[in-house]
Image (cartoon, rainbow, N blue to C red):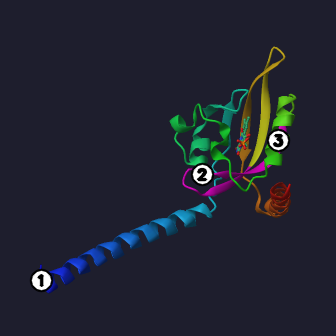
Amino acid sequence: MTQARVAQGQEESYREFFVNSNKNYFRSVIQSKSKYEEYRYDRGISISSTNVKGIITYVNKNFCEMSGYEKHELLGKSHNVIRHPDMPREIFREMWECIDSGKDWSGIIKNLRKDGKYYWAHSHVIPIIENNFIVGYSSLRKPVLRNELDEVIIRYNKMLLAEAIY
Ligand SMILES: Cc1cc2nc3c(=O)[nH]c(=O)nc-3n(C[C@H](O)[C@H](O)[C@H](O)COP(=O)(O)O)c2cc1C
């Protein structure tokens, strides 16, 4: 191979490397951007139901749109499929303690969409009781008002910090 052909070959592989690494760079920028991007949804109440173990048995159209998943991707999965790492463990512990004892639970939850974006929702979780037995749970979600979030974010961050320490 002549000197010129080596140089040409090298140039092509550099170009290929440059294009590919840029593609990867832009892909990772898009991914990390969506990771921290909020998804606002206010087109109606979103509903999901689970069995007693928290396995999803029903979702409405709004829930699919809000979470970015298709219905078939959610049914049969644990509800933690949309769990966001910014949510303190303690919140879910309280939720389960409450609904397991037959009471309703209300709270604000940050959820993770399939595309990596997050959304906040006001959740109201109720136990479904038949013949005195809890047979499952349902949850209704509505949008959160911006002014409610400031206090919640501070409180959750304190809880996360405490969970990281202890
Ligand atoms: C009806 C119902 C709705 C729930 N909705 C959510 C939800 O929107 N987001 C979420 O992260 N967990 C939700 N959970 C709680 C999850 O089942 C789970 O406990 C939580 O994501 C924490 O996951 P982990 O226990 O695996 O850490 C819901 C549970 C029930 C029974």
Locate residue 157: give its quadrant.
bottom right
Q: CA distance from mark 2 to mark 1?
A: 54 Å
Question: Observer-nearest residue: 1 or 81?
Answer: 1
Single out the residue that lies furthest toward the top: 131
Q: Which residue is mark 3?
A: 93
Q: Horizontal and vertical percent for residue 156? A: 82, 57
Q: Which image quarter is the C terminus in?
A: bottom right
* Residue range (magenta): 104-121
Amino acid type at circle 1 is Thr
**For discs 2 and 3, the disc positioned in front in the rendered view:** 3
Provide the secondary structure element on which disc 2 rests.
loop
According to the picture, the residue beneath numbered tag 2 turns out to be: 113
Spot the residue most to the left: 2
Q: Cα distance, mark 3 to mark 1? A: 70 Å
- Secondary structure type for disc 3: helix
Q: Earlier in the sequence, mark 3 or mark 1?
A: 1
Rendered residue at 81%/64% (across/down): 150
Compare marks 2 and 1 and give the one earlier in the sequence: 1
Q: Position of residue 75 (x, y in %)?
A: 58, 32
Ligand 1, seen in the image, is in the quarter at top right
Give the SS element for disc 1. loop
